[in-house]
Amino acid sequence: MYIGDYLARRELYSSDKLAFIDAGKSPEWRLTYRDANRRANKLANWLKSQGVAKGDRVAILAKDGYEHLDLFFACSKLGAVHTALNWRLHWQELLEIFNYTNPKILVFSDDFKEGVANLITNYQLPILHLDGDGLPSSLHFETILQSSQSSEVTCPSLEAEDIAALIFTGGTTGLPKAAQVSHRMIAWNTLNTVIHDVTHNDVYLNVFPMFHTGGLFVYTLPQVIFGGTTILIRAFDPAQVLNLLEREKVTIFAAVPTMYQMLTTAPNWDSVDLSSLRFCTSGGAPLPVPLVEKYTKEKGIRFKQGFGMTEFGPGIFALAPEDAIRKAGSIGRPNFFVDAKIVDEQNQFLGPNEAGELVLKGPSYSSGYFNNPEATQAAVDERGYFHTGDVAQYDEEGYFYIVDRKKDMFISGGENVYPAEIEKVLYQHSAIHMCAVIGLPDPKWGEVGKACVVLKPNQTVSEEEILQFMTERLAKYKVPKSVAFLDALPISAAGKILKRELREKFM
């Protein structure tokens, strides 16, 4: 057995166990671990015949589907590097990524055929299409896979520090950086994950995009290593998600707060039975207390909350269900194999209740950024701590709180203003479904806040009422100067609110 060949090991242990359900297909795919391993061997044999070898990048540009995992596991057998691309990017942005990652093969779905056509006129490489008619130069993925040999493929020289995948950071400014996910990082993330009550018999529904660390590494890979069942969907659809949670008796579910909000307004929310869920995990932003209370009261849900990032883990912090209300707003305590500290501007460690930058150290850190030694070196200080860019603090019991992202903070009249603090108050208003606060230039104060809100169905409230609501709960300098009522907030494929787009809209 070689590092990274997860499916061969899992076929040995539980070959007939249901491993994956692809609910985005019609009809659905239901694969055992034997099925999954044989598909991965077939694809690995074909990739090998095309000259793909250890360290080579193989790219995929596609909506979620099992083919992402076909490619990931095939690459792991060869020691190649799975490179999932953010399908929200323009093809010219993807071309820049191609020029510094140099993939040898591209797999794509029909949604992105036009962009791929432009891409390959500027960067020549073999291409495989998943669906539709493809392009004149493309081969059909499933045809290639089924016609290939299923003999076992391994990479005897593979070591723990070799790279399994490139995961691109958010890219809010400039070209996204590619975090290098090693086989060592995957193993340590699994240890951090299973300590928090993951078993051999869990059923997990993944709603995160597969180009995102949430899609591949939060629970999907730990589930494979532990032998559970993972369900995939093509895109987040609240009604479909609720149906699957009930039908497949899902035991673990993870999403971001915006997704949890959207589930409560789905037409089948009132009738769905969620009693199979042992717990739900929320990350990406603080989970509003009223939302926790709604899930607990109406569906009996136990919430675990946490915090992760592309470059580290991704599992870094976890908040136990029994602390969901008592420590509302906390991301919890560091996972077992994570060392977390708070530092000031001089990089000195701070004590309880002192806000500063969150820094991390531990064996689940990535291997830096691909082909970017400057960024790799800048991210880690002389003591080996990774600097997250998050403003945080911890209390006397060791529970950490994200105050805000450094880039989201704005300065109004010389005072630091943290939007997360204001959003927490806005979510207490009974009429507000979703919200985001941004800072905008102001000739008098330098910057002032603007609250962007989406109201719940059939709710009416004025700007003056919302401003008064905040005035009664926040220091005056924190209260935004205006409120914008929107039908929806711009949300990334990972379910996070795109504040950059809001700033551009209102600049």
Image (spheres, grey):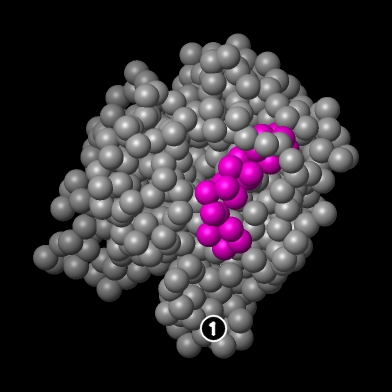
Q: Residue placed farthest to the right in the image?
A: 13
Looking at the picture, tell me which residue is in the foreground, 156 or 300. Answer: 156
Residue 258 vs 284, above or below: the answer is above
Residue 430 vs 152, above or below: the answer is above
Which quadrant of the figure has residue 495? top left
Q: Mark 1 points at which residue?
A: 381
Which quadrant of the figure has residue 400? bottom right
Which quadrant of the figure has residue 253? top right
Q: What residue type is disc 1 on?
A: Asp
Residue occupying image coordinates x 45% and y 37%: 128
Which region shows up in magenta? Answer: 36-56
Which quadrant: the N terminus?
A: bottom right
Residue occupying image coordinates x 31% and y 53%: 123
Tell me if residue 140 is in the magenta stretch.
Answer: no
Residue occupying image coordinates x 53% and y 59%: 56
Residue 365, percent from left and from top: 62, 67
Main SS class of the magenta portion in the image: helix
Residue occupying image coordinates x 47% and y 30%: 140
